[in-house]
Amino acid sequence: MKKIYIVTTYTGTLLSYLIRNISKTPYAHVSIALNQELKPMYSFGRLNPKTPIFAGFVEENINEGLYAIRKNTMCRVYSLDVTNLQYEKIYENIMNVSQNRNEYDYDVKALVYLTVDKPREKEYKYVCSHFVADMLKRSGVEIFDKPSYEIIPNDFYDLDCLNLEYEGLLSKYQIKEHLYVGNMAKA
């Protein structure tokens, strides 16, 4: 068995504020990471940290890009146990999107459809929650009982199969083993 990590965040930007209020969730963005260090996290979001105008497939890091600008970003880090085969499939599916990123776009219209509660599926277009859910589904990880394009950030909140590892400031996230070693060093 292996673990993958699902990270939900709220940066406080105007767009995240709107998404948060429309979707009625404390977190507006979702990413997936294949290691506990969360380096990198994969998602669909802004390509330039200073503007949401250009968006697409992104590789995010805790203290870089938008997260370096928005140091008060709140997050929840979840782990999910997957088989070795599922892990490899998730990696392959993410790398396929990464290598073909020019074929994929951020689905701006899906955000508009969210306001009227009408999910939209469009080939080669994603929003963050749809991307993460689709990578899981394509890899044989079935955690939702609805299509991946209907998944919103709130669907990850308190999902029974996810283990909450951390909640707080993303900039303060540390791997559990390091926290233990750090506490031992202080003793």
Image: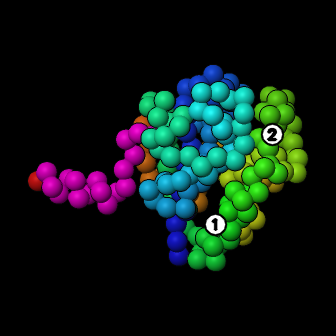
Q: Nearer the viewer, residue 48 or 171?
A: 48
Q: Which residues are magenta?
A: 170-186
Q: Is residue 72 left or right of residue 142?
A: left
Q: What amino acid is found at the position of numbered circle 1 in the picture? A: Tyr
Disc ID at residue 107: 2
172 within the magenta span: yes
Residue visible at 36% across and 50% down?
174
Q: Could you classify mark 1 by the number of other residues whose Cα lies within 10 Å: few (under 14), some (14-19), or many (20 or more)?
A: some
177 within the magenta span: yes
Q: Could you classify mark 2 by the number of other residues whose Cα lies within 10 Å: few (under 14), some (14-19), or many (20 or more)?
A: many
Residue 96 rendering spot, x and y as whole percentages: 73, 63
Q: Which residue is mark 1?
A: 91
Q: Nearer the viewer, residue 138 or 152?
A: 138
Q: Residue lying furthest top in this view?
A: 14
Q: Toward which corner of the image does residue 34 lie, by quadrant? A: bottom right
Q: Is residue 96 left or right of residue 109?
A: left
Q: Toward which corner of the image does residue 83 lie, by quadrant? A: bottom right
Residue visible at 44% across and 31% down?
71
How far apart are the two marked residues, 1 and 2, measured between alpha carbons? 22 Å
